[in-house]
């Protein structure tokens, strides 16, 4: 499933291509036809994201609420003076001509709804703070995490705790902070959590700029280590995600994986030892 940086990047691309312009709205598959007709020819105000949710705003406080789900994809194309026929199951198409033509096609999304400002606000209010938003408040997340017995690897994926973090960022940020995914949230110190939050902000902002998830430090890049670049459909250089039984880039230990709340969790047993409370050791 696309993680928060992907939605923020798409919001930026949509804003650059369409904000402040009159936009044609169509639904080639017919699944969004009535709402598309309602929006067709309207001014597109801008686009924003919150976690894994995307909101495309039109004049009159009307929003297209999009959630890509597992297989959804939104492609934004600029500079095409000829509008091609829709390819595949295009649920939503936005396009505009003139000196700077652009079009965007949405396929495979789990959600594509026309909503008002009230519903948009409700969706955002249900989410935890987003590391990519200026209003993202880490203290909100800390209050949830510091009082929970649930594993930190579970809490980081809970969109009501922190919005936008998916399986890749979860696995990688825990490795970078030498923390086992099963460590209970309430055992973290405030400084430990704040370091994780600040790291997520930097990693996800990098993802917005590049469109990739790269989490390895300079000394662990393929060039510095003399190793082959990672080959994976997700792209990017990572420490543990989808590297089961491969050697850790730091210590050489085989990476492990096991399910955690329905998703595979990845970690290095040496760099991320299991947490043992002092009380349990006494």
Image: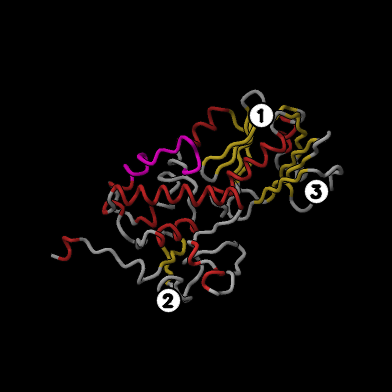
Query: Which residue is at a point 40% across and 45% down the rendered structure image?
Result: 161
Q: Is residue 86 left or right of residue 14?
A: right
Gap in Å between the C-alphas at discs 2 and 1? 51 Å
Answer yes or no: do the residues labelled 2 and 3 have beta carbons within 8 Å? Answer: no
**Residue 282 appears at what percent x and percent y?**
12, 65
Residue at disc 3, secondary structure: loop
Q: Position of residue 123 (x, y in %)?
A: 50, 36
Give the residues in magenta.
131-144
Q: Earlier in the sequence, mark 3 or mark 1?
A: 1
Binning the other alpha carbons within 10 Å of mark 3 as few (below 14), some (14 to 19) or many (20 upward) gives: some
Q: Which sits earlier in the primary sequence, circle 2 or circle 3?
A: 3
Question: Which mark, residue 203?
Answer: none
Which residue carries the number 2 mark? Answer: 252
Q: Residue at x 40, y 69 (%)?
A: 268
Determine which residue is flagged by label 1: 45
Q: Nearer the viewer, mark 2 or mark 1?
A: 2
Q: Is residue 161 toward the left or the right of residue 56 in the image?
A: left
Query: In which quarter of the view is residue 272 placed?
Result: bottom left
The answer to whether residue 106 is magenta is no
């Amino acid at each position: 499933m696309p993680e928060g940086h992907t939605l923020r990047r798409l919001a930026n691309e949509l804003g650059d291509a369409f904000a402040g312009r009159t936009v044609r709205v169509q639904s080639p598959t017919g699944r969004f036809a009535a709402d598309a007709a309602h929006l067709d020819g309207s001014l597109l105000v801008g686009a924003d994201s919150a976690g894994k949710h995307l909101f495309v705003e039109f004049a009159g406080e009307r929003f297209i609420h999009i959630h890509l789900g597992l297989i959804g994809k939104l492609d934004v194309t600029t500079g095409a003076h000829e509008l091609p026929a829709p390819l595949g199951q295009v649920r939503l198409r936005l396009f505009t001509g003139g000196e700077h033509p652009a079009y965007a096609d949405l396929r495979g999304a789990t959600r594509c709804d026309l909503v008002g400002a009230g519903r948009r606000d409700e969706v955002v209010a249900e989410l935890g703070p987003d590391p990519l938003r200026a209003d993202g408040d880490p203290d909100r997340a800390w209050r949830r995490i510091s009082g929970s017995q649930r594993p930190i690897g579970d809490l980081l994926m809970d969109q009501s705790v922190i919005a936008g973090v998916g399986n890749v960022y979860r696995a990688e940020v825990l490795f970078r902070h030498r923390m086992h995914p099963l460590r209970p949230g309430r055992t973290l110190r405030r400084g430990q959590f704040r370091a994780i939050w600040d790291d997520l902000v930097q990693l996800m902002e990098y993802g917005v700029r590049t469109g990739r998830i790269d989490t390895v430090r300079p000394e662990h890049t393929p060039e510095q280590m003399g190793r082959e670049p990672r080959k994976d459909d997700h792209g990017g250089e990572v420490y543990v995600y989808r590297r089961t039984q491969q050697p850790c880039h730091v210590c050489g230990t085989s990476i492990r994986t096991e399910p955690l709340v329905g998703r595979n969790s990845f970690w290095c047993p040496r760099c991320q030892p299991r947490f043992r409370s002092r009380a349990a050791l006494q």
